[in-house]
Image (spheres, grey):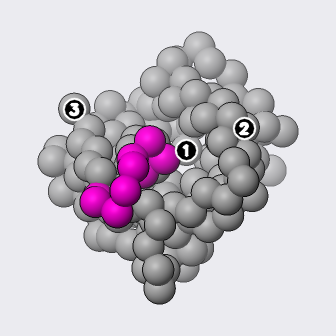
Amino acid sequence: MDIRQLYQDVIVDHNRSPRNFRRPETIDRVAEGYNPLCGDKLHIYLSVVDGKIADLSFEGNGCAISIASASMMTEALLGKDESEAEALFKDVHRMLTESDFAADPAKLGKLAALAGVRDYPMRVKCASLCWHTWLAALTSTGAEAATARTE
Ligand code: ZN
């Protein structure tokens, strides 16, 4: 089995049919993310109930990596409690930025498909945009949209 091809297929699939791509009827927390290097724009909608991620969805326009990453993130985080979600964020961030970090497929699941992105510094921001935006939504208070911007 060619792992690179498998990962490529996962990204193509999530870009073609993004999961949880919707705006909820009532918005609990929302953040807007923008990656000026590529032009990716995302809204992340989040609802936390009893410390658990009860709902998570997104809308936006962007390249295949940014959309696939957001789609996979929503699948990975739904149902997790806040501390599990933050731990996963840290693992994903390391996977995307540290060349010697060995992604644990048992922990990262499909998200490991994005590991190859770290060889392309411009693409790292595409893949991490949704995560920074999610964190902005998580730490936001009130109904006003928080914003995240990749540097
Ligand atoms: Zn992009």
Q: Is residue 146 above or below residue 10?
A: above
| Residue in front for this viewpoint, 43 or 4 | 43
Q: Is residue 135 above or below residue 73?
A: above
Q: What residue appears at the point 55 percent right and 44 percent down from the top-left corner?
A: 114
Q: Is residue 143 above or below residue 127?
A: below
Q: Is residue 3 visible?
A: no
Q: Which badge, 2 or 3, is on the more N-terminal residue? A: 2
Q: What residue appears at the point 28 percent right and 60 percent down from the top-left corner?
A: 144
| SS category of the residue bearing label 3 | loop
Q: Which badge, 1 or 3, is on the more N-terminal residue? A: 1
Residue underneath mark 2: 84
| SS category of the residue bearing label 2 | helix
Q: Is residue 57 left or right of residue 5?
A: left
Q: What residue appears at the point 24 percent right and 42 percent down from the top-left corner?
A: 149
**Three-letter code for the amino acid on which mark 3 is drawn:** Glu
Where does the image place residue 20, in percent across and percent down from the top left? 57, 74
Which residues, given as a range, are shown in magenta?
A: 137-145
**Count of marks placed on residues:** 3
**Three-letter code for the amino acid on which mark 2 is drawn:** Glu
User: Which mark, residue 114?
Assistant: 1
Looking at the magenta stretch, what is its main secondary structure? loop
